[in-house]
Image (cartoon, helix red, strand yellow):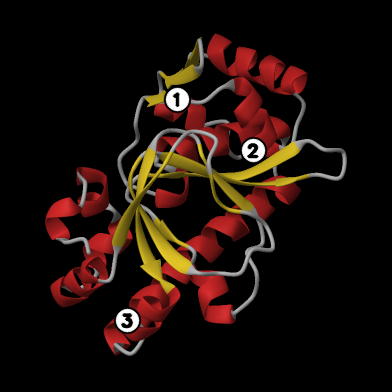
Amino acid sequence: MANLTDTSAAMRTNPWFCALPAEEQEALMRQSELMTLHPGEYLFRRDDAPIAFYGIQSGRLKAFTLREDGKEAILAVIEAGNWFGQTSLTSGQPRPRDVVALDRSTLFVVGAAAFEALMQSTAFVRAIAGLQSIHMNWLYRMVEDATLHSTRARIARRLLLLASGDVSCEPQCRRELSLSQDTLAMMLGITRQTLALELKTLAEQGAIVLRYGRIEICSKEILSSFQDCV
C-alpha cells in the first residue's frame, strides 16, 4: 500500500493528480501498490486483459504498436506523474497497444477490483472522466496534426508538445528533450532521412540545437512560428 509521501515531485505537480480532491488523492494512494520495471520490460502488451490502472512515480514508458511492415509506430512517451490505463478498465476491452519501459521506472498499480471500489465515489468518477477527456483531446490533436499540417509543422508541434511532457500537457516548457531522432521519426510516422532534413532547417532558423540523443529548444517563439505551416 502506497501513501502520499510516496509521490514524486512530478506526481505532485501533475495537472490531473493536483486537481483531485485531497480525500481522493489519499484513497487512490491507499489502493496503490508499487512495482518496478527495467528498461525494455513490458507493462502490458496489445490484446492483454486490463488488470490495473497505473501512475508513474519515476521513469518513462512508451506506448506503441508494430506496423504491418514490422516497424514501430510510437504513440506517446508517458512520463513521470501521469496516470493511464483507465480506458480498457472502464470499457472491459483488451489493451489496444503495447507499453514498455524506456528507463528504470517505478509505478503505482491500482488493481481492477480496487479501481472499481474507487469508482464508487462520484468525485473519482468525475476525475476519471476528466482524465479520459485529457487523453482524447491529446489523441484528436495527433489526428489533426497528421491530416491538416505539413511535415515541418507536425515536427514543430510535436517538439512543443514533448517540451510540455507530451501526454502531461504541462504549462511550463522544458528546454531539453531526451529522445533520439529515430524515436521522434517513429512518433511522427516519417522516415529518419525526412526528419533529419527538417530538423536541420529548424536548427538553421535558431529554433533548436541538435545534440547526441537529445534536442535542445533554443527559442520556443521561433519553433512556434512553424507549427501552423501548411
- Counting from the top left corner in percent of width and height, residue 72 is at 72, 38
Mark 3 nearby-residue class (10 Å; few <14, some 14–19, many ≥20): some
Q: Amino acid at mark 1?
A: Ser
Q: Is residue 126 above or below residue 152?
A: below
| Residue 187 badge | 2
Q: Is residue 102 above or below residue 91?
A: above
| Residue 178 badge | 1
| Residue 118 badge | 3
Quarter-wise, where is residue 91 in the image? bottom right
Mark 1 nearby-residue class (10 Å; few <14, some 14–19, many ≥20): few
- Counting from the top left corner in percent of width and height, residue 141 is at 59, 54
Closer to the camera: disc 3 or disc 2?
3
Is residue 22 left or right of 19 when viewed as pictured? left
Q: Amino acid at mark 3?
A: Leu
**Which badge, 1 or 2, is on the more N-terminal residue?**
1
Query: Which structural element holds mark 3?
Result: helix
Q: Residue at x 68, y 16 (%)?
A: 196
- In the image shown, does 119 or 114 lie closer to the viewer? 114
Q: Residue at x 44, y 33 (%)?
A: 103
**Which badge, 3 or 2, is on the more N-terminal residue?**
3
